[in-house]
Image (spheres, rainbow, N blue to C red):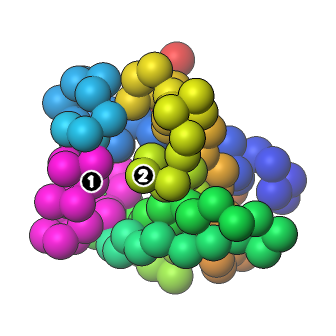
């Protein structure tokens, strides 16, 4: 498995879920409000489930970042289980610059510009996970 491919797949499904969770609105404040609501209710959107969010610093940086933790939705986990695979332990974080920690000159113009700055950090993965997820998750091309 190529980790970059799993990172890309998780990034695609995560950013899509965040955009859909915000009803396609591009306003950063609205996006943050909807992320907070999704985390507090552990909402499933598309094929991901919002789990937790917190602010922290990354080693070597003084700027705070927003960490949003995700898992696969129960529907994806059930479909994988029906195929003899277990994907319920996969968890990952989307790490974004914390908006209130940015200087005015660094503020992104839109919510989507902000999301583009995010990085995926995978907390748990297995060798056959990427291929299994490709079979289960259909991405719009």
Numbered disc 2: secondary structure: helix
Q: Is residue 86 above or below residue 136?
A: below
- In front of the other: 6 or 59: 59
Over which residues does the magenta segment extend? 32-50
* Residue drawn at (42%, 73%) of the image: 54
Residue 37 lies in the magenta stretch = yes
The answer for how far apart the CA atoms under marks 1 and 2 are is 16 Å
- Residue 114, percent from left and from top: 50, 35
Of callouts 1 and 2, which one flags the residue occurring earlier in the amino acid sequence? 1
Numbered disc 1: secondary structure: helix
- Residue 137, percent from left and from top: 47, 44
The reply to whether residue 126 is visible in this rendering is: yes
- In front of the other: 112 or 122: 112
Task: Between label 1 and label 2, give the one nearer the viewer.
Answer: 2
Location of residue 106 by image quarter: top right
- Residue 18, percent from left and from top: 34, 43
Location of residue 16 by image quarter: top left
Residue 10 placement, left or right of 8: left
* Residue drawn at (19%, 48%) of the image: 34
* Residue tagged 1: 35
Checking the image for residue 100, the label placed there is 2
Location of residue 129 by image quarter: bottom right
The reply to whether residue 69 is visible in this rendering is: no
- In front of the other: 89 or 35: 35
């Amino acid at each position: 498995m190529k980790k970059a491919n799993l990172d890309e797949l998780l990034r695609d499904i995560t950013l899509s879920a965040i955009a859909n969770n915000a009803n396609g609105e591009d306003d950063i404040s609205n996006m943050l409000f909807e992320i907070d609501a999704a985390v507090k209710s552990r909402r499933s959107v598309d094929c991901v489930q919002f789990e937790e969010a917190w602010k922290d610093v990354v080693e070597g940086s003084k700027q705070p970042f927003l960490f949003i933790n995700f898992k696969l939705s129960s529907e994806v986990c059930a479909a994988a289980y029906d195929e003899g695979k277990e994907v319920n332990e996969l968890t990952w974080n989307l790490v974004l610059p914390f908006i209130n920690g940015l200087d005015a000159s660094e503020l992104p113009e839109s919510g989507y510009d902000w999301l583009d700055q995010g990085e995926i950090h995978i907390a748990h993965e297995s060798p056959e996970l990427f291929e299994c997820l490709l079979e289960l998750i259909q991405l719009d091309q």
